[in-house]
Image: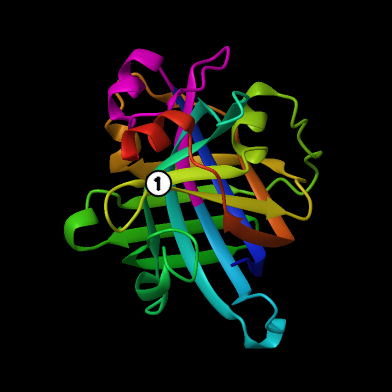
């Protein structure tokens, strides 16, 4: 089933870490995608609107906020071609419905969290307070929008590893990997200055160091199930 919606705002907070530190945190079937600076790790903070299964009209869609922690990875598909995507160990949302339907009707398993987003002038404050078994993924970010910033070159290694990544793999309800393809209607992103970041996930990488972060706004998007990495399919067989 395809799901459509609208990304009102997407903040990609990026660091890079050493491949040897990242590798043990990945599931079977994927490996670190290494740029010239290291492996991109980070968190993706999102505000959605009009999210609904196709072919429902957009006025019946839901609005909610979400957060996804991610590691840039690559793998071989069944065809043998190399795919660059992200591994998402956990997703969070402030929606009460999404944890019930995520991984079933809506792509991706989601955990509940308290998510706060505020903007004062060009300053954005975004905070995620997690709960229960996934409580080690709190985030607090302050970032400043540069209205004069030019769109980033998605051929850049850091930008390409996160802005261009279409497929995310993550644990499903049964613990096995599931894959979701997210296709935005455009990939226009601008660099944004992160002035403050607190993240238990990022702090867990001793080698992590800041990398360019990006802001994407006002873009239609669709999600659908994607093919799993070849080795993950064989492990599940």
Give above or below for 144 relative to 28: below
Expressed as whole percent of the image width and height from the top left, the position of residue 3 reads: 61, 68
Quadrant in which the N terminus is drawn:
bottom right
> Which of these two is toward me, 125 or 212?
212
Expressed as whole percent of the image width and height from the top left, the position of residue 45 reads: 50, 54
Residue at point 34%, 21% (across, down): 23
Left or right relative to 133: residue 198? right
Badge 1 element: strand
Give above or below for 31 relative to 48: above
Q: Is residue 123 visible?
A: no
> Which of these two is toward me, 176 or 128?
176
| Residue 82 sits in quarter | top right
The residue that disc 1 covers is 170
Residue at point 56%, 80% (across, down): 62
Q: Is residue 97 magenta-colored? A: no
Give the residues drawn in magenta, as a range.
17-44
């Amino acid at each position: 089933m395809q799901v459509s919606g609208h990304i009102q705002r997407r903040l990609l907070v990026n660091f890079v870490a050493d491949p040897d530190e990242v590798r043990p945190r990945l599931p079977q079937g994927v490996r670190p995608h290494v740029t010239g600076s290291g492996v991109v790790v980070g968190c993706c903070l999102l505000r959605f609107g009009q999210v609904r299964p196709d072919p429902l009209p957009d006025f019946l869609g839901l609005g909610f906020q979400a957060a996804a922690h991610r590691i840039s990875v690559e793998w071989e598909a069944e065809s043998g071609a190399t795919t660059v995507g992200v591994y998402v160990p956990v997703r969070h949302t402030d929606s009460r419905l999404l944890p019930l339907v995520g991984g079933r009707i809506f792509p991706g398993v989601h955990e509940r969290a308290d998510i706060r987003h505020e903007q004062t002038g060009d300053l954005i404050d975004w905070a995620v307070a997690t709960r229960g078994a996934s409580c080690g993924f709190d985030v607090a970010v302050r970032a400043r929008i540069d209205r004069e910033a030019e769109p980033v070159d998605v051929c850049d290694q850091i930008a390409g590893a996160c802005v261009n990544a279409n497929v995310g793999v993550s644990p499903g309800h049964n613990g096995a990997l599931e894959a979701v393809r997210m296709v935005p209607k455009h990939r226009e992103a601008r660099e944004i200055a992160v002035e403050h970041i607190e993240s238990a996930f990022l702090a867990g990488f001793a080698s992590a160091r800041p990398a360019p972060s990006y802001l994407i706004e006002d873009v239609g998007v669709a999600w659908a199930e994607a093919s799993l990495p070849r080795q993950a399919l064989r492990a599940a067989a």
